[in-house]
Amino acid sequence: MSIGNKSQSTQMFRLMLYQRALHPELFGIQDRRTIEQPAYELEAWLMPGGHAMRFQAGGQCVTEVVTDQDLQLPERGLLHTLPCIGEKEHDENVEDAVRFVAAVQTENLSDNLYSATMAEMRDFGIETGAMSYEWTDEDGVNLSVLDIQRYKGEIHAQSYHLLAPGGFVLRTQSIFEIV
């Protein structure tokens, strides 16, 4: 597949927000982490080139999914879909119990910048104890990193998905906050 076709496939990335939990069998989970605080629970899953985070608080469940896979994800409970192209932001209150804020940014890097960013993100993942999964395919080395900070009434998460075709990098920043 040519780089032109690959960069077209990276435009399939999307961030989806659900008002429900999703079953783990829908995803090729490579790493999993659960964070429990008195006021909330977060379960995070890292997949090749994507992630999912389920946040439960105040009787509400909100799930963020970022993927480029053509998964057969349910429509039930889907609140919003945000294409991950360029720079975008989304802010939503769910049932006046959970506020969800997300920002996405994509870029295509030259080979040198992609290699430098890959090395930087590997080091970042190790230094912060972030969830990380690296894999090699016919196009090169790829990396997904999910870093989560917990606070008393909220979660902050940053993801970095680096894909060799076209030096594609997707960054997301998400906040789940108890209202």
Image (spheres, rainbow, N blue to C red):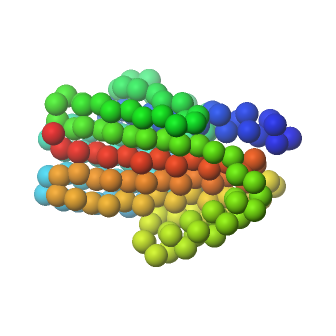
Q: Is residue 83 above or below residue 65?
A: above
In this view of the protein, which residue sits in the foreground, 122 or 62?
122
Q: Nearer the viewer, residue 29 or 63?
A: 63
Quarter holding the C terminus? top left
Quarter holding the N terminus?
top right
Residue drawn at point x = 77 percent, y = 58 percent: 111
Q: Is residue 88 left or right of residue 117?
A: left
Instruction: Tell me which residue sits at (63%, 45%) in the image.
Output: 107
User: Residue sitting at 42 percent across and 61 percent down?
Assistant: 147
Question: Can residue 47 be seen?
Answer: no
Viewer-closest of 74 and 68:
68
Residue at (64% x, 64% y) in the render: 118
User: Farthest residue in the right direction?
Assistant: 2
Where residue 144 appears, as percent x and y from the top left, is 56, 57
Q: Position of residue 157 (x, y in %)?
A: 38, 53
Q: Is residue 6 left or right of residue 55?
A: right
